[in-house]
Image: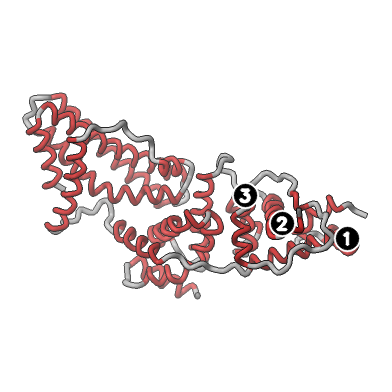
Amino acid sequence: MTSCSSIVPLLSAYLDAELAPPSRRVVEAHVAACASCAGVVRDLGRVRDAAATLGPMTPPAGVWKRTRQAIGATNVAPTDTPVPRRWQWIGAAAVVFAVVTAWLMIPRPARPAPDSRDTAAFRGNAAAADAVELTVVTSDRTARPYASALLELERADMADSATAGMAAMLRAQFETADRAIAASQAALDVDPESDAARRQLVAAIARKRDVMHATGQLLQALQRIDPERATQAAQVLFTKG
Amino acid sequence: MSAHVDLHLAAQCQAGTPGAFDELYRTHAPRLFGLACRLVGRRDAEDLLQDIFLTAHRKLRLYKGDAALGTWLFRLATNLCLDHLRSRSTHAGHLTDPLDDEPGASPHASGPVLGVVDRIDLERALETLPPGCRTIFVLHDVEGCEHREIAALLGISDGTSKSQLHKARLRLRRVLAPARMS
């Protein structure tokens, strides 16, 4: 008689009728003669049958509400240049003003470590990558004024030419990051499962985020050198899109 | 749902027809939420469900009707759940568990040890499984996927899928009948 230790590993396949006939006959003969293995087969069957009755689960109502809001935020493509109504722009400008004011008035902490979702995306986490893409869409609306502010810093009659030069460099970085984002998104459109394209997208997004951070730091530094210029540059964020 | 109806709904969703995506969500969210809860846990399932439908919204233009819309969504959701699990995995992205001898495999008990398995008990017991064999058990025994399909999703062999399923069932047997198995 075959031993239980050699039969037990086959019992799920036996239960699911996946054994070849010779193996099935061996297991059948053993189970017929062994109460313990017969008990295992019966129990495994009960587990399997119970699993088949596990049905759908109702998600909390808030999930759909948040999903709809997020879908609404993604409906404006990054290349779109909407003309917001005045009251909408005032609200958006208020948010940007609060952010820039914080940067100007509060000592900045060290740049945070890469977002764990970016890291997750590097590991091929599609959900995180898609969430980061959502951030790109919303951050692009915030990032565009920064790029415009940098342009103003370049054009202004600056006493500190190094600042103007840095602004030009940051603006070029914005444009490079935007091109990389567009290229990665185009690659994902062709092959949505491409891990390489997803990684490139995350890297491009992270680069754009870094440029935004650097822009804030530039304005903060300018505040110490030329507060009036810094204020003018910050005001550009409210009036240009 | 026929292919024609699926394509029509997908087209309506893409066109932004009011109520279309609501219908898509109402129809498919419960199954996908159940899948997410059982694969990644309730805590992460809500956020993951949102990600699933955001991704679906973005990728609907790629749906060509060659599979049922529900199947298309299920595959998309499964991939997102697996990506989420891989990001949490400590085994360099692998989603299979070591095939150690399962203590419950030793059939010391004479005869069956389980009565009728209560669904709530089974849901709780599922949470105790390691992610690898839990994934395969959910996909096979709960969702009805074949080993060939599971193997393709996870990048493993059919044999590995079968052995992981067996491991999961043995563990659940042990968890569901602890008193008599100790």
Mark seen at residue B178: 2
**In terms of image quadrants, where is residue A145?**
top left
As drawn, A164 above or below B140? above
**Image quarter (top left, top right, bottom left or bottom right) of the N terminus of chain A:** bottom right
In the rendered image, residue A239, in percent from the top left (x then y), is placed at 11, 47
Q: Are marks 2 and 1 in contact (CB under 8 Å)?
A: no
Q: Are marks 1 and 3 on the same chain?
A: no
Mark seen at residue A34: 1
- Which of discs 2 and 3 lies nearer the camera? The answer is 2
Residue flagged by tag 2: what amino acid is it?
Answer: Pro
Give the structural element (helix, strand or loop) at label 3.
loop
The residue that mark 3 highlights is B130
Q: Residues within 10 Å of mark 2 (few under 14, many from 20)?
A: few
At horizontal 17% and vertical 33% (from top left) the residue drawn is A219
Residue flagged by tag 3: what amino acid is it?
Answer: Pro
At horizontal 33% and vertical 60% (from top left) the residue drawn is A71
